[in-house]
Structures are given as C-alpha cells and as structure tokens.
Amino acid sequence: MDTTYRGRRITVTRPTLGNECAIRCKITMNGQTWYGAPGLLVADQLAELRRMIDNVDSETQRVTAVAYWYAPGTVEVCPLGAGSAYGEHLRFTGKECMERGCVRDRVQRARARARRYGITGASVSNLLTTAGFTAYDIDSARHGFSASGVQARRAVSLHQRDKHGLEPMAEVLRAHGLYVVWDESGRHLWVYSRTEAVAQGMDVGPEVAPPAPGPKPPTTPAARAVLKRAGLALAKPSSWGSYSTEGLYTVKGAPGTVEVHWHTHEPDYTASRARGAAVLTQAAGVLSDAYTAVHLPPSQGDCVVLSLRTAARAEEAAATV
C-alpha cells in the first residue's frame, strides 16, 4: 500500500504466507526500508507510523530522530557537527541548531562577545613595542611596561616602574584612536577602545585618524647584519653577557634604539680608544642610510646609538644623555 503522510512517502506491504502472528510488514519511507512489529496488519502498521510521525513533528525545536523520519528538505546536517566532540547531527533547515553541544557553544561565544571591549593587553603591548617601547621581562627588562586586561573595568591597565615614562606611551595610544586616562591613584593608566569609552559615557572628544604605518624600529640582528655587510667585525659577549674582549658590540638600547658599543681594552687604553673612535665613526656612516646615528659623549662610554626617531627626537636624546 502506497500513501503520503505529512510529506513522507510511505509504502507498506505484508506477506500473505507464513505464521499470521509472526508476519511483519515491510515498510519503506523516504527511501529507507525496515520491518514493523510482528502480527500487525497493513492498516494497523500505517496507524502506528502516523502516530510516530505526529510525535516526531511535535518537537519543533530540536531534531530528535534520523533524517528519513522527516519530510524531505525539512532537516539538514549541522555544519558544526562534523569533527566535533559530539559528532555529526541534524538541525532544521535554515534554523539554529538546538543540539546541546551547539547551544553550549553559542552561549559561550555570546558570553565571550559580551566580555570583549575592543582591545586586549596583548594588542596594547603590540602597539607599544612596535613604537619602540620595551615590555617588561623579569630577566632582561624589569624597567619595561606591562599591559593587562581588566574585565571589571572593560579596559587595559598599563603599568611601568617609572610612571613618568607612561605619558609618551599614552600619546602613542591616543594617536591610534584609543582613550587613555590616569588612574585615580596616579600610578598607572587605563586604556579604553573609543567605542567602549563612549558606551561608558566618557568624554572622548573628536575622533582622531590613526597615524600612517611608519618604519619599524631598528633591531639588534638588523644592525649587526648591516655592519657585517660593510666588513666591520663584531665581537661576541661572554656567556654572562659581559664585554670580555676589545671590539664592536651591538646591544638593545632605550625604546626604539639599538646601541653599537666599542669596548676599550684596558692595558692599551689610549690606542684602543683611538681605534674605537675610528670604528664607531665608520659604523655611524654605514648605518646612516637606514638610521639616525647619535654619538654619545665619551663620559657615557664609547658607543653610537642608532634610532629611527625623528631628527628632533634624536637631537633631544643626544642632549639629555
């Protein structure tokens, strides 16, 4: 017997031979074939199928049966199920999946979106290090800054041991369109995205276009490569990081700078210093095409500081050393 019920194409046939109580109807629905309960007549089997289909269709939020129990085109494989911990599953076509795992994931993503406030400690750190400021490192840069997100304030807290060094960082962040204010204690800064600051009712003022990307700050490996290509020999520090022999050394300097030092050999101080002056002058000339080279006064050591800062900043740095 062929029939259609709620969009399902159903075929039920019953063998005529055999034990009447053991005979089972052959059922085909939406291309899937199986056998019914023993002893049921075709009419009884169809009534049972309709009851089961009604039960399946009564659940309108979540797919609770395999695909062939549904009218063609009403369910589809959830694209988020493949490869997940809870496996492949179905959802109603074009609707949000109500499988428990998918619901849990949506809730978690919604909570994560609600926690976001446009910036993170990592993104603020990246802006500052790109601008040449040094991030805190317990081994090598304890004077550096640290930035961490604070969910309760929906902002990033910016710290540095020397709080006077925070204002130049604030200027860089403001130039990138962020809203920066001092904490009530005056010891650190709060950094907000412009959108978040507006949402919290802060007076952010007119929007400022972010600056065009500038050149990257010099790095020690890049400076060493330039010097080596020019034929200048570079000495290597000892395993403890000290200057163990006479020669030319490159070290990371203040934010945005690389320092090129000449270590003077003590037993032959005068001659070594003369050699160093000549080598540093040559190094400054080699590096002048890519960097601004600033000579430090001899009282501060025999070295050249390389910087990508503007000429005004470089002159200021030289004057204050």
Image (tube, rainbow, N blue to C red):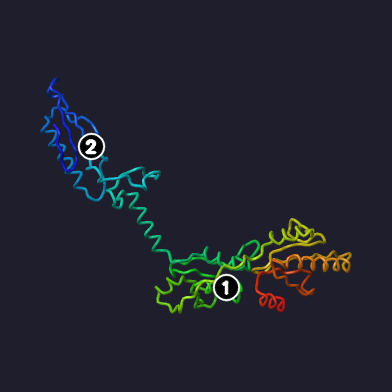
Drawn side of residue 300 relative to residue 137, left or right: right
Relative image position of residue 99 (x, y in whole percent): 31, 48
Q: Mark 2 is on which residue type? A: Asn
Looking at the image, is 21 positioned above or below residue 186? above
Looking at the image, is 176 positioned above or below residue 65? below
Disc on res. 169: 1
- Extreme residue toward the top, this view: 18
Q: Mark 1 is on which residue type? A: Met
- Of marks 1 and 2, which one's residue comes earlier in the chain? 2
Nearer to us in this view, 143 or 272: 272
Residue 28: quarter of image: top left
Residue at the spot x=43%, y=66% of the render? 117
Relative image position of residue 111 (x, y in whole percent): 38, 60
Q: Quadrant of the N terminus?
A: top left
Drawn side of residue 50 relative to residue 175, left or right: left
- The residue to which callout 2 is attached is 30
